[in-house]
Amino acid sequence: MTRKLTAPFFEIGPKAYLYGDDALMLAKAAEAASLEFGVSVIFTPQLTDIHLIAQNTKHLFVCAQHMDALRPGRGQGSILPEAVKAAGASCAMLNHVERQIPLAALKATILRAREVGLISIVCSDSIAEASACAQLGPDVVVAEPSELIGTGTTSDEEYVRLSTEAVKRVNPNIQVLQGAGISSAADVYRVIRAGADATGSSSAVCKAPDPEKMIREMLAAARQAYDERTK
């Protein structure tokens, strides 16, 4: 059975910054903040840490950083959807700029995610690509201009609005996560207030002097902005 994400939510992506016990520590801090502020958290660790984190948390949406569309059998080095699900993941992130997938394979992988009960989160690099990705039928589209990733510079409010509208025109039930360059609670507040269902951060959290404090501030901002926008 596929878990359901409700807005507002927030993605924390350790990428390759953290692994093992350090990633688990961050995951537990994220879970505590998630419960405190009522903001669901997608946590996207190294693939080898999915089981560790899923076994030691109850409320996070643990997410694979990548997944392939193959079925059980041959496929050395590929990431099997059934194995991702069995490890305890709830989601799979697809087509990140650092791990892009050709369009035909992306569609097949979204279908495989649905088949095994995983939430599909598809990354896009432009308004046109966000619309094209939405037509493939994922659960979440990430609108994330690649040139802003890790820069501390976020998308402007017009991009947030136009890319969100582009996805919702295709299917209003697809949720939109506005990413790239999110480095402060103020950034989180601004993109959620501008219409996003979610946002997220990697380097700003993982490299913060106090990651737990940063997570709490960002989730508090997400909750405040969403409540103000929807009241």
Image: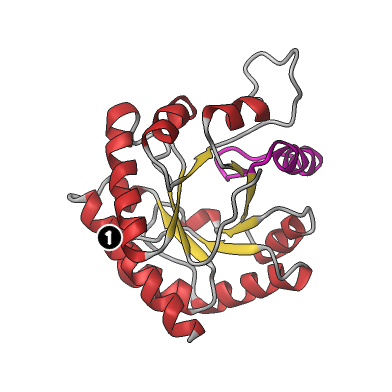
Q: Quarter of the image containing the N terminus? A: top right
Horizontal and vertical percent position of residue 198: 50, 64
- Say if residue 46 shows up in the picture: no
**Residue under the image location 35 percent in, 30 percent down:** 19
Q: Tell me if residue 227 comes above or below residue 75 in the rendering.
A: below
Q: Position of residue 46 (x, y in %)?
A: 45, 31
Q: Is residue 94 visible?
A: yes
Horizontal side of 109 relative to 149 (left or right) equals: right
What is the quadrant of residue 68 in the picture? top right
Whole-percent x and y of residue 117?
Answer: 67, 41
Estimate how packed mark 1 is, as few (under 14), some (14 to 19) or many (20 or more) residues with alpha carbons within 10 Å: some
Residue under the point 27% across and 33% down: 22
Q: Position of residue 30 (x, y in %)?
A: 33, 50
Residue at x 78% of width, y 44% of height:
107
Q: Is residue 109 magenta?
A: yes
Q: Is residue 215 magenta?
A: no
Where 129 sits versus 121, above or below? Answer: below
Asked which colour scheme the image uses, the reply is secondary structure
Q: Residue furthest left?
A: 209
Of 111 and 2, nearer the camera is 2
- Residue placed under numbered mark 1 in the picture: 216
In the image, taking residue 87 as reference, residue 151 lies left or right, namely left
Q: Which residues are magenta?
A: 94-118
